[in-house]
C-alpha cells in the first residue's frame, strides 16, 4: 500500500505566520501614523512661517515713506497687538490667521534698540495639546512680559528677525 502524503500546514506554522504578519502590519501602521503626524507638523510650520512673514512685511511697510520719523514696530492703528492685526480678515487687517482655530496661534513682535530697530516676529501655536514655541505663560498661549512690558519670546520654530529703519 502506498504511503499517503498529507499536504498542508500545521497549527503551529499557521500561528507563527500570523504573528509575523501581525508584527509587520503593526510596524507599517506605526510608520504611516508617524508620517501623518510629521506632515501635519510641517504644514502648520509652513503656515506659521507665512504668518510671520506677513507681519514682518507690514512692519517694513509701516517704516517706509516720508511720514516715518523713527522706526517703530507698533501695530497698525486700530489694533492692540500684531496678533489682533493678523487675525482680522478685513481689508485693514492681516487677512486672518493660517492656523485654525485662530485661538491656537499667537503672533508676538518684539522690538529692541532704537535706530536701526531690531524686530523679532515669532509665531507659536498649539497642536494636539502641545505648544510649539516659547510664547507661553503657565502652559497657555499667552505672551510673557519682558523688559519694558514687551512680550518676551525665547524661541519659536517660526521666528524671523531683522533690522528696521525708516526707508524713503
Image: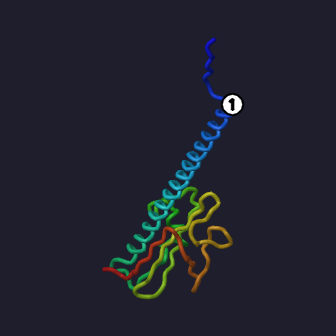
Task: List the single residue furthest toward the top.
Answer: 1
Q: In the rendered view, tell whether residue 91 sits above or below residue 4.
A: below
Q: In the rendered view, tell whether residue 15 sits above or below residue 27.
A: above
Q: Is residue 11 left or right of residue 127?
A: right
Local crowd size for mark 1, using a 10 Å CA cut-off: few (<14), some (14–19), many (≥20):
few
Residue visible at 65% across and 38% down in the picture? 16
Q: In the rendered view, tell whether residue 20 sits above or below residue 62.
A: above
Assign the C terminus to one quadrant of the image. bottom left
Examine the image and state in which quarter residue 134 appears: bottom right
Residue 39 position within the rendered picture, expressed as x and y whole percent measured from the top left: 50, 54
Assign the N terminus to one quadrant of the image. top right
Residue 95 position within the rendered picture, expressed as x and y whole percent measured from the top left: 46, 60
Q: Is 5 in front, or is 27?
A: 5
Residue visible at 36% across and 80% down in the picture? 67
Residue 84 position within the rendered picture, expressed as x and y whole percent measured from the top left: 54, 67
Q: Is 3 in front, or is 143?
A: 3
Element at label 1 = helix
Q: Is residue 112 left or right of residue 17?
A: left
Q: Is 81 in front, or is 45?
A: 45
Q: Is 139 in front, or is 20?
A: 20
Q: Is residue 7 left or right of residue 121?
A: right
Confirm whether residue 92 shows in the render: no
Residue visible at 63% across and 28% down in the picture? 9
What residue did someone put label 1 on?
Answer: 11
Task: List the single residue furthest toward the bottom.
Answer: 114
Confirm whether residue 127 shows in the render: yes
Residue visible at 49% across and 56% down in the picture? 43
Amino acid at each position: 500500500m502506498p504511503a499517503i502524503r498529507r499536504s498542508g500546514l500545521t497549527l503551529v506554522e499557521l500561528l507563527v505566520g500570523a504573528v509575523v504578519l501581525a508584527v509587520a502590519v503593526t510596524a507599517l501602521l506605526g510608520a504611516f501614523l508617524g508620517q501623518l503626524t510629521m506632515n501635519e507638523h510641517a504644514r502648520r510650520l509652513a503656515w506659521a512661517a507665512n504668518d510671520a512673514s506677513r507681519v514682518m512685511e507690514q512692519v517694513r511697510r509701516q517704516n517706509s515713506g516720508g511720514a516715518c520719523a523713527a522706526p517703530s514696530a507698533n501695530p497698525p492703528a486700530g489694533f492692540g497687538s500684531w496678533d489682533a492685526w493678523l487675525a482680522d480678515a478685513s481689508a485693514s487687517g492681516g487677512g486672518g490667521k493660517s492656523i485654525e482655530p485662530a485661538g491656537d496661534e499667537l503672533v508676538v513682535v518684539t522690538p529692541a534698540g532704537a535706530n536701526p530697530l531690531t524686530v523679532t516676529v515669532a509665531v507659536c501655536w498649539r497642536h494636539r495639546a502641545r505648544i510649539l514655541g516659547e510664547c507661553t505663560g503657565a502652559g497657555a498661549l499667552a505672551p510673557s512680559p519682558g523688559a519694558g512690558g514687551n512680550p518676551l519670546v525665547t524661541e519659536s520654530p517660526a521666528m524671523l528677525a531683522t533690522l528696521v529703519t525708516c526707508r524713503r
